[in-house]
Amino acid sequence: MYKDHNKILWFDSSQWSHEVILKALEHLEDVKYNLLGSGSKSYMEKLSMCPAWNKTFFAGQVPHREVFNFMNRSQVGLAILQYSANTMGKHGTLGNTKLFEYMRMGLPVICTGFDLWKPIIQKWECGICVNPDSVEEIADAINYLFSHPEEAKEMGRNGRKAVEEEFNWDVECEKLLELYAVIINKKNQGK
Protein backbone atom coordinates (compact mmCIF):
# COMPACT_ATOMS: atom_id res chain seq x y z
CA MET A 1 0.00 0.00 0.00
CA TYR A 2 1.19 3.51 -0.46
CA LYS A 3 0.49 6.98 0.77
CA ASP A 4 1.72 9.85 -1.34
CA HIS A 5 3.14 7.27 -3.76
CA ASN A 6 5.01 5.35 -1.07
CA LYS A 7 3.96 1.77 -0.63
CA ILE A 8 3.47 -0.87 1.99
CA LEU A 9 4.44 -4.30 0.77
CA TRP A 10 2.60 -7.54 1.32
CA PHE A 11 2.57 -11.10 -0.01
CA ASP A 12 0.19 -13.97 -0.71
CA SER A 13 -1.75 -16.59 1.28
CA SER A 14 -4.58 -16.34 3.79
CA GLN A 15 -2.19 -16.99 6.69
CA TRP A 16 -0.91 -13.44 6.07
CA SER A 17 -4.12 -11.72 7.24
CA HIS A 18 -5.00 -10.05 3.92
CA GLU A 19 -8.71 -9.86 4.71
CA VAL A 20 -8.06 -8.17 8.06
CA ILE A 21 -5.61 -5.78 6.40
CA LEU A 22 -8.14 -4.89 3.71
CA LYS A 23 -10.72 -4.18 6.42
CA ALA A 24 -8.16 -1.92 8.14
CA LEU A 25 -7.59 -0.07 4.87
CA GLU A 26 -11.27 0.83 4.74
CA HIS A 27 -10.51 3.23 7.62
CA LEU A 28 -7.51 4.88 5.94
CA GLU A 29 -7.20 7.37 3.11
CA ASP A 30 -4.46 7.78 0.52
CA VAL A 31 -3.05 4.32 1.14
CA LYS A 32 -2.30 1.69 -1.48
CA TYR A 33 -1.64 -1.97 -0.71
CA ASN A 34 0.79 -3.97 -2.86
CA LEU A 35 -0.01 -7.64 -3.01
CA LEU A 36 2.59 -9.91 -4.60
CA GLY A 37 2.42 -13.64 -5.12
CA SER A 38 -0.44 -15.98 -5.75
CA GLY A 39 -3.41 -17.49 -4.07
CA SER A 40 -6.14 -19.90 -5.04
CA LYS A 41 -8.71 -18.57 -7.47
CA SER A 42 -11.43 -18.67 -4.80
CA TYR A 43 -9.22 -16.85 -2.27
CA MET A 44 -8.29 -14.12 -4.75
CA GLU A 45 -11.96 -13.72 -5.71
CA LYS A 46 -12.83 -13.38 -2.03
CA LEU A 47 -10.19 -10.67 -1.58
CA SER A 48 -11.33 -8.84 -4.70
CA MET A 49 -14.82 -8.56 -3.19
CA CYS A 50 -13.49 -6.60 -0.19
CA PRO A 51 -14.40 -2.88 -0.30
CA ALA A 52 -10.73 -1.87 0.00
CA TRP A 53 -9.66 -3.95 -2.99
CA ASN A 54 -9.70 -0.70 -4.97
CA LYS A 55 -6.74 0.35 -2.77
CA THR A 56 -4.84 -2.79 -3.76
CA PHE A 57 -2.28 -3.23 -6.51
CA PHE A 58 -2.13 -6.96 -7.19
CA ALA A 59 1.05 -7.75 -9.09
CA GLY A 60 0.66 -11.53 -9.00
CA GLN A 61 3.78 -13.64 -9.00
CA VAL A 62 6.90 -11.69 -9.83
CA PRO A 63 10.53 -12.84 -10.12
CA HIS A 64 12.31 -12.72 -6.77
CA ARG A 65 14.65 -9.92 -7.91
CA GLU A 66 11.60 -7.73 -8.63
CA VAL A 67 10.31 -8.18 -5.08
CA PHE A 68 13.20 -6.02 -3.89
CA ASN A 69 12.18 -3.32 -6.37
CA PHE A 70 8.77 -3.22 -4.69
CA MET A 71 10.43 -3.06 -1.28
CA ASN A 72 12.64 -0.17 -2.40
CA ARG A 73 9.54 1.80 -3.37
CA SER A 74 7.72 0.95 -0.15
CA GLN A 75 7.33 2.89 3.06
CA VAL A 76 6.29 0.05 5.40
CA GLY A 77 6.51 -3.75 5.39
CA LEU A 78 3.69 -5.88 6.80
CA ALA A 79 4.45 -9.27 8.34
CA ILE A 80 1.07 -9.95 9.91
CA LEU A 81 0.99 -13.72 10.14
CA GLN A 82 -1.99 -15.48 11.71
CA TYR A 83 -1.63 -17.57 14.86
CA SER A 84 -1.62 -21.18 13.69
CA ALA A 85 -0.10 -24.60 14.21
CA ASN A 86 2.74 -23.51 11.89
CA THR A 87 3.62 -20.71 14.32
CA MET A 88 2.96 -22.74 17.47
CA GLY A 89 0.09 -20.38 18.21
CA LYS A 90 1.27 -17.12 19.72
CA HIS A 91 4.84 -18.36 20.12
CA GLY A 92 5.81 -17.66 16.50
CA THR A 93 8.61 -18.85 14.30
CA LEU A 94 11.95 -17.51 13.18
CA GLY A 95 11.76 -19.78 10.14
CA ASN A 96 9.80 -17.19 8.21
CA THR A 97 12.14 -14.64 6.69
CA LYS A 98 9.64 -11.93 5.67
CA LEU A 99 10.18 -9.91 8.87
CA PHE A 100 13.95 -9.97 8.38
CA GLU A 101 13.73 -9.17 4.67
CA TYR A 102 11.80 -5.99 5.45
CA MET A 103 14.27 -5.09 8.19
CA ARG A 104 17.19 -5.70 5.82
CA MET A 105 15.63 -3.32 3.31
CA GLY A 106 15.30 -0.62 5.99
CA LEU A 107 11.50 -0.73 6.16
CA PRO A 108 9.71 -0.20 9.45
CA VAL A 109 7.59 -3.27 10.06
CA ILE A 110 4.11 -3.89 11.32
CA CYS A 111 4.07 -7.48 12.47
CA THR A 112 2.29 -10.02 14.59
CA GLY A 113 3.21 -9.70 18.25
CA PHE A 114 4.53 -13.26 18.49
CA ASP A 115 6.49 -14.20 21.61
CA LEU A 116 9.57 -14.59 19.37
CA TRP A 117 9.07 -11.44 17.26
CA LYS A 118 7.98 -8.92 19.89
CA PRO A 119 11.32 -8.89 21.78
CA ILE A 120 13.15 -8.29 18.48
CA ILE A 121 10.89 -5.36 17.59
CA GLN A 122 11.20 -3.92 21.09
CA LYS A 123 14.98 -4.38 21.40
CA TRP A 124 15.72 -2.83 18.03
CA GLU A 125 12.82 -0.34 17.98
CA CYS A 126 12.15 -1.23 14.36
CA GLY A 127 8.38 -1.49 14.12
CA ILE A 128 5.01 -2.06 15.73
CA CYS A 129 3.54 -5.36 16.90
CA VAL A 130 -0.18 -6.00 16.46
CA ASN A 131 -2.80 -8.66 17.02
CA PRO A 132 -3.27 -10.23 13.55
CA ASP A 133 -7.05 -10.30 14.04
CA SER A 134 -7.43 -6.67 15.09
CA VAL A 135 -8.57 -4.37 12.30
CA GLU A 136 -8.20 -1.40 14.66
CA GLU A 137 -4.62 -2.21 15.75
CA ILE A 138 -3.51 -2.70 12.15
CA ALA A 139 -5.18 0.52 10.97
CA ASP A 140 -3.73 2.45 13.92
CA ALA A 141 -0.21 1.11 13.26
CA ILE A 142 -0.36 2.00 9.55
CA ASN A 143 -1.73 5.44 10.34
CA TYR A 144 0.92 6.01 13.01
CA LEU A 145 3.83 5.21 10.70
CA PHE A 146 2.45 7.38 7.89
CA SER A 147 1.77 10.29 10.23
CA HIS A 148 5.22 10.01 11.90
CA PRO A 149 7.52 9.69 8.87
CA GLU A 150 10.75 10.56 10.66
CA GLU A 151 10.10 8.01 13.38
CA ALA A 152 9.18 5.45 10.70
CA LYS A 153 12.48 6.12 8.90
CA GLU A 154 14.36 5.70 12.18
CA MET A 155 12.61 2.39 12.77
CA GLY A 156 13.68 1.32 9.28
CA ARG A 157 17.30 2.27 10.00
CA ASN A 158 17.13 0.38 13.30
CA GLY A 159 15.83 -2.73 11.55
CA ARG A 160 18.62 -2.58 8.98
CA LYS A 161 21.18 -2.24 11.80
CA ALA A 162 19.64 -5.28 13.56
CA VAL A 163 20.13 -7.39 10.45
CA GLU A 164 23.67 -6.13 9.93
CA GLU A 165 24.68 -6.78 13.54
CA GLU A 166 22.61 -9.74 14.71
CA PHE A 167 20.24 -11.38 12.25
CA ASN A 168 22.45 -12.54 9.40
CA TRP A 169 24.11 -15.74 8.24
CA ASP A 170 27.61 -14.64 9.28
CA VAL A 171 26.49 -14.39 12.90
CA GLU A 172 24.48 -17.60 12.67
CA CYS A 173 27.45 -19.42 11.08
CA GLU A 174 29.57 -18.58 14.12
CA LYS A 175 26.88 -19.99 16.41
CA LEU A 176 26.67 -23.16 14.33
CA LEU A 177 30.45 -23.64 14.35
CA GLU A 178 30.47 -23.18 18.14
CA LEU A 179 27.75 -25.83 18.47
CA TYR A 180 29.72 -28.23 16.28
CA ALA A 181 32.81 -27.66 18.43
CA VAL A 182 30.84 -28.47 21.59
CA ILE A 183 29.39 -31.63 20.03
CA ILE A 184 32.78 -32.81 18.77
CA ASN A 185 34.39 -32.02 22.11
CA LYS A 186 31.75 -34.02 24.00
CA LYS A 187 32.09 -36.90 21.55
CA ASN A 188 35.90 -36.92 21.96
CA GLN A 189 35.57 -36.80 25.77
CA GLY A 190 33.31 -39.83 25.68
CA LYS A 191 35.96 -42.02 24.03
Image: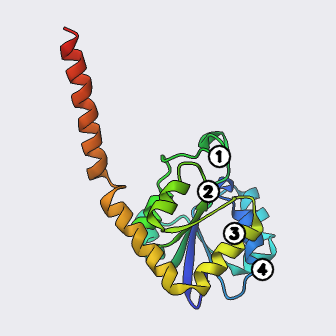
Q: In the image, is 27 to the left or to the right of 185?
A: right
- Pointer 3: what residue? 138
Q: Is residue 63 visible?
A: no
Give the quarter of the image for residue 111: bottom right
User: Residue 33 at what x, y percent from top left?
Assistant: 63, 76
User: Residue 184 at what x, y percent from top left?
Assistant: 21, 23
User: Residue 152 at what x, y percent from top left?
Assistant: 51, 79
Quarter of the image with the C terminus is top left
Q: What type is the residue that disc 1 sits on?
A: Lys
- Pointer 1: what residue? 90
Q: CA distance from mark 1 to mark 2?
A: 8 Å
Q: Residue at x 40, y 74 (%)?
A: 157
Q: CA distance from mark 3 to mark 2?
A: 11 Å
Q: Residues within 10 Å of mark 2 (few under 14, many from 20)?
A: many
Viewer-nearest residue: 40 or 8? 8
What is the number of callouts on the image?
A: 4
Q: CA distance from mark 2 to mark 4?
A: 22 Å
Viewer-nearest residue: 54 or 86? 86
Nearer-N-terminus badge (4/1)? 4
SS for dot 1: loop
On residue 113, which mark appears?
2
Q: What type is the residue that disc 2 sits on?
A: Gly
